[in-house]
Amino acid sequence: MEWSRSQQAVLKHHESALVVGPPGSGKTLLLLEKAHRLITSGQKAALCTFAFRSLEYIKSYAHGHYPQFNAHIATGGLRAGTLRDLAAAQLQAAGEPFSFVSNNQVREILRTLVAQQAFPGTLSEAEHIIRAAKSHAKKLPETDRHYAFVSAYQHKLEELGLLDRHDIIRRHVLGMREGKVPPLPVSHILLDNLQDATELQLIWLQMHMGSGVALTMAADDDITAFVQDGAMGLQAIEAVEAWPDITRFNLEVSFRLPKTLAPAINKIARQLKHRATKGDGTANPNPGDLRAEAFPSAVAEHAFLASTCSQLLAQAKGSRLAIGILTRDDFTASLITQVLRKAGMNPASYARLIWENPTAQLVLAMLYVMLGQATPAHLQLVLIGFGLPAGVVTGLFSQGLRAEGWLAAGCPLPPLEGLTPPLQTAVQRVRRAFAGAGQLLQAKAMPPRDVFKSLVAELLTTLPAAEHPEALLATDTLLSLSGKLTEVLPRVMQETLPNMESPITVAPVREVRNMEFTTVILPHAGAASWPWPPQTLLGPNPDHERRMFYLAISRTRANLLLTWHTPQPSPFLGELQQTLKNQAKKGAA
C-alpha cells in the first residue's frame, strides 16, 4: 500500500503518538501496519480496542492483508484484545484469581435491582447509569441521585464474588501502583478509537506509558459511540494531548467518502457544539449517490430492503461488494437480520442476541415449558408473564408446584387461600392454556410448532402492546430454526460470531466504528429513530444523536440509502438533502 506523507510520519515515529483524523483517513490501517513493522523487527506490541466485535472485525481484516497476523498472536509477539481482556490476562498471570460477570449476568442482576430498588427508568438506562458511574477513577459520591442503585449493584457483585469490566481495569491499575501486577509485557500499545475511552481506561493507558511503553492512539471524537457509558470523546483527546512526550499527528484527508457526498456528510459533523480540529477533504474521486425511500408499512420497507440487497448482490457479479445495513438499536438489527435470512441471505449480524431481551426470554421459557424441559425459573417466568403476581407464583411453589413433569401431569396448580376472583381466573387461565397444549401434543392433533403459535397468541393477550414486536420476533426466530423444537433449544442461546465473509452486514450503529461499505443503508430512518427519543432518566443529548448519525453515514465509500415507514423522515436527512441542493446550485452557477 502507498502511504501518504502524513501517514508515513506516523509510521516513522517510534515514541508515543496521538493520531487524529476523519473517517476513512486510514487510522486503523496505520495501527495494523505499525503492529506488523514492530513485530517483524522483533518487538512486542498490543493491539487494543474497547469493544469485542470491533476487535473481531479488525482481526478479520488484518488476516486478509497481513498473512502472519494470526501467527504473531499465536507466538506471543502480538497481543490483541479489549482493554478488559488484556488487563484480565495480567491479573491471571500475577496469580490474582477472579470471576468475570458476563453481560447477560449483569442484565439479570439489574433486572432484579430495578424491581427491588423501585428504579424509575428502563433496564437500558440502568445499564448506562452503572457503566457511567463505574467508569470514573473515584467512586460515586453519596450525594448522587443514583448512589443507592449503583451501591446495590456493586454489593450484589461482591456477594457473588464477581468482577465486571470496570472492576478488572481498576484492579489492574491498583496492582500496577502497588507493584503486585505488572503492566503488559510489550514495548508498544496500539489503541483504536481513543475517543471512546473512559477516565479509568485513560489512567490504565497513562500508567503503561509511565512504565516505558510507547502508545500510539488513533481518534476521531465525531464518532464517539459510548458517551452514555462514560466515554470522554473530545475530553479524552485533549487529556492525552496534554500528557508529556506525546506527539500529535493530524490526518487531513479521507480516502473513503465519495466526492459528491463528502460535503454533506461532513456538514452533519460540523454542526456539533464541540469537536477536535480535523480536515474534511476527500481523496475518493468516485461519485456517490444519496437516495431516500418512504413506505406505507414496515412490511413493505422490509420487502424493499431484501429486494435491494438481492439486486446489489446480483449486480456485483463477483466484484468487491460490502452492504452495511445500520440501525439505531439492536431490536431493529435483529428484525432485519431475520427478514434477510428468510429471503435466503446470510448477513453478518452484530446485534445482541434477542434472548437478552426480557420478552424474548419469556417466549423462550414458554417453549421450554411446552416441551417438558422447563426449570423452576422457566415456569416462574411463564406464570408471571401470563399475569400472575410474583407473590402468588412464590406461593404456588411453596405449596408444592414443581416444574419437572408439570405439562405431562396436566399442569396442576396447588390451591392458594385468599386469592381474589380475578387472580383465581388468571390462575385457571394459564393452567387451561398449557393443559390444552399438552393434550394436543400428546394426541398429536396438531404439529408442535402450531401448538407453540397458539400459546404465543394466548400470551400476547396478557402482554403490553409495546412488547408484542419483541415477542413475535422471538417466536419467528425460534420457528425459523431448522430441526425439531427439542433439538432447537440447545442451539438457541449460543453466542456466535458474525459471518465475516458475508457481503451484507446488519449492525446497530455503535458497532461499526471501524467498518466501511460500498453502500450504507439506514432502515427505519424516521424522525422517531434519528434522533433517538430522550429516555426517562438520561434525557436528551442532541450532540450524541448527531454523532451516531454521522458515524453511520460516514461508513460509505459510494452510496447512501435511507428508508422509513413512519410519517416523517429523520431531520438529518433534510440536512443532507439541503446541502446537496446548495452544492448543485453552486456548481450550476
Image (cartoon, rainbow, N blue to C red):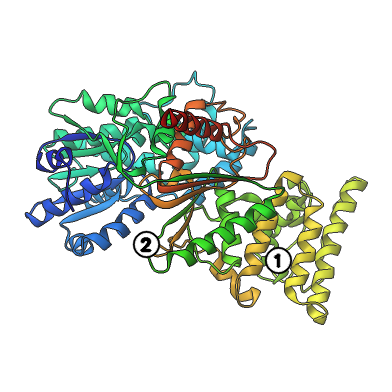
User: Which amino acid, mark 1?
Assistant: Val
Q: Is residue 477 left or right of residue 260?
A: right
Categorize mark 2 by other alpha carbons within 10 Å: few (<14), some (14-19), many (20+): few
| Residue closest to the far bottom | 444
Residue that protrudes farthest toward the left in the picture: 41
2 or 1: tag closer to the N-terminus:
2
In this rendering, the answer to whether 44 lies above or below 448 is above
Based on the displayed image, in which of its 4 quarters is residue 397 positioned? bottom right
Q: Quick one: 554 or 55, which is closer to the camera?
A: 554
Q: Secondary structure at mark 1?
A: helix
Residue 245, percent from left and from top: 12, 28
What is the quadrant of residue 13 in the picture?
top left
Q: Residue at x 27, y 37 (%)?
A: 253
Q: Is residue 318 above or below residue 65?
A: below
Quarter of image, res 396: bottom right
The C terminus lies in quadrant: top left
